[in-house]
Amino acid sequence: MDQRFDVAERFADGAQYIAGRLRQGGSEATHPVVDPATGERVFSYRLAGPADVDAAVAAAGAALPEWAGATPGERSDALHRFAAVLTERAEDLARAESSQCGKPIKLSTEFDVPGTIDNTAFFAGAARQLEGKAAAEYSGGHTSYIRREPIGVVGSVAPWNYPLQMAAWKVLPAIAAGNTIVLKPAELTPLTSLMFAQAATEAGIPDGVVNVVSGTGPEAGEHLVSHPGVAMTSFTGSTAVGKRVAALATATVKRVHLELGGKAPFVVFDDADLEAAAHGAVAGALINTGQDCTAATRAYVQRPLYDAFIAAVADLMETVRLGDPFDPHTDLGPLVSHAQRDRVAGFVERARGYATVVTGGAAPGGDLARGAYYRPTLITGAPQDSEIVQSEIFGPVLAVLPFDGDDEGIALANDTPYGLAASAWSRDVYRTGRASREIRAGCVWINDHIPIISEMPHGGVRASGFGKDMSAYSFEEYTQVKHVMFDNTAVVRKDWHRTVFGDRQT
């Protein structure tokens, strides 16, 4: 049975959510939401323009004093209610996510939506844990303590690959810490970000605390991150766009948090469990049709296992079922758009000139031809400095390269500009311990690849950006640390004053 989401009825009032209500965008331009499984337009909306961003920032600014002044317990209670509303709306959220992204419904229902609800519940608890260094007399004559205070209005830009989860990763730590927020989702996939904001209002979070402007990056996004009323910007997306965001934000001296591209290595040592590694590589490379910044994109396999690994991965990839995202048996849905499908195909076609496509490497025919589908693709024989190994593809493509010694494997893993995630596969605790220390990435999995949990941070190094999403560490992004110091002596003329005027008292 077709379970696609009825978008037109739900968002008849518009795709901007400002001060607790939907409204039409102020731009004359419209943008479609397209079902990538069919290529059919399911909704069109008027885009946000600069005036909409101004209105959203004003609404967030107006809501800030009340929300920032709420006790941690009050914010925690509101977030617990928020999690309950999301739980009630779980089925609608999953259907909307699969409709706009083409995600298999089993991924939306078992990963995206429950992960978002769990994030919300986590931050409901974390809102009560804004900790600082212990109060003490560090200078002897004074008592010092630390306050963690909200930064102010946050302007965040989220990507299209995980629209619901990325909305949560931006919104939740910000509002748990007492900030208010204006979120710009990708114009391709605004639906679940809007539903997330509506759920916040239904949970009793005050109007203006969570706002959503659905517009393009050059018009709405750039105006948001450079807005003088925004105190912090958080961006998730490509490294190239992240550089632009950083330049705009720092021009007005904003706090900046960037979660950027990735090219995750998957390092298989010669004592690894081959079957486990092959299954992990296929799952890690194909999750969300490869549209994941932590996806396994380049596997380095020590030579004794190299041929067997390639054979096992190829066999598994050929069992992956492409199909209608709403069929519960579908394993792999389409890419988010035909443009993204063509981009991925371009990488593979260029690679044919210097590497071997072992399996996949084409869009399917038949009933799936009208959608943005692309077959799981395995590539071998590519040089380390080739485009397919060095560049983020964001599709269901895995390149496999051999290595000899452990030194070489770790060096190859580090040989890209990125540093978001990685995995190492071995039965030897010393080998995996070394890999976890020496691979330069924000997350290193051992004998697995992809799992994330709300309690642990997510974020990269080098060209993958800086700062952390999720976990209590995210409060370091969304709070301002203030030192407060009390004089305990009641002495009018302090000894240190003589360094400015007068002589030491005798």
Image (spheres, helix red, strand yellow):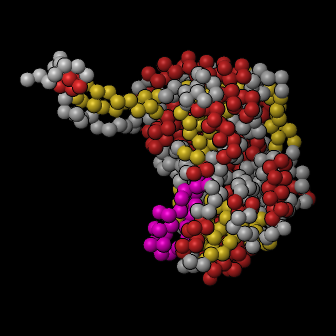
- Foreground of the two, 139 or 148: 139
Where is residue 449 shown, x and y percent of the image?
59, 61
Depicted 182 relative to depicted 316: above or below: above
Where is residue 154 shown, x and y percent of the image?
57, 29
Q: Is residue 177 visible?
A: yes
Depicted 200 relative to depicted 443: above or below: above
Please identify the residue farthest to the left as the structure is shown. Answer: 506
Q: Residue at x 62, y 82 (%)?
A: 304
Depicted 227 relative to depicted 80: above or below: above
Q: Is residue 137 magenta?
A: no
Q: Residue at x 82, y 43 (%)?
A: 35
Q: Is residue 423 magenta?
A: yes
The magenta region covers 418-441
Q: Along the horizontal axis of the image, is 141 left or right of 156?
A: left
- Foreground of the two, 443 or 256: 256
Where is residue 432 shown, x and y percent of the image?
49, 69
Please identify the residue farthest to the bottom as the structure is shown. Answer: 304
Q: Residue at x 67, y 44 (%)?
A: 237
Where, by quadrant of the figure, is residue 395 drawn?
bottom right
